[in-house]
Image (spheres, rainbow, N blue to C red):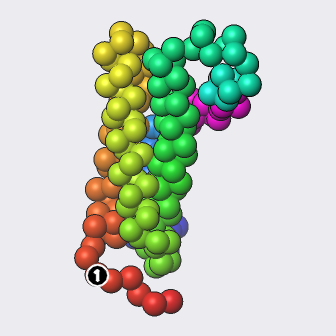
Amino acid sequence: MVQNPSAFRILRWRGWLVLEVVVGFLPLAAILVVGVIMSPVWIGMLLAPIFDADYRSAMGPLEVAITFGSLLLVVVGFFGLVGLFRVVRSILTPSAPMVRPRQTRIYAITGTCVIAMLVAVYLATGYHMIAALGVPALFVSGHVMYLARHVLFSHAPPSAA
């Protein structure tokens, strides 16, 4: 017999939230891991024209922009993932103080914008299955930000701890 039914409900609610975040963000986290693995190659592509004159003629401005954009998406995606972890932590443990609320808000909003941009780019280029991987993450990030709205968007000054 459960002694405190409200504690059981809270525990079950937290479990569902963690499951929602894992299921919603696992495909994009896998894509982020691929981006992290590919980052040295992209950095090499950007630095190769400095050292090799033949490579300079092979890489046009469009390829440079795409490579730089891919690196930027990986970095910003990592910050968005850090923001997601911070927001979920603040939801699961409301008594714990939020780590840098302004920075967490910026990370979370930036991460959501990156996901929205990826979904839009993949839809525009015809990669509908990859875009479908990002749609659940958009809904989950919106839901998580809604649940943490009092922590993320409060106008109270941070407490000195």
The percent position of residue 37, horizontal first and vertical second, equals 69, 31
Residue sitting nearer the eye, 119 or 41: 41
Taking the view exactly as shown, the residue that stands out farthest to the left is 155
**Image quadrant where residue 154 sits:** bottom left
132 sits to left or right of 75? left
Q: Where is 107 relative to 24, above or below?
A: below
Tell me where the magenta segment starts and ends, as one range. Answer: 29-44
Residue at image mark 1: 156
Residue sitting nearer the eye, 132 or 158: 158
Q: Is residue 41 magenta?
A: yes
Crowding near pointer 1: few (<14 within 10 Å), some, many (20+)?
few
| Residue 73 at least partly seen | yes
Q: Where is 102 relative to 44, above or below?
A: below
Q: Tell me which amino acid carries mark 1.
A: Ala
Residue placed at 31% from the left, 47% from the top? 142
| Residue 92 at least partly seen | no
The percent position of residue 83, horizontal first and vertical second, equals 47, 56
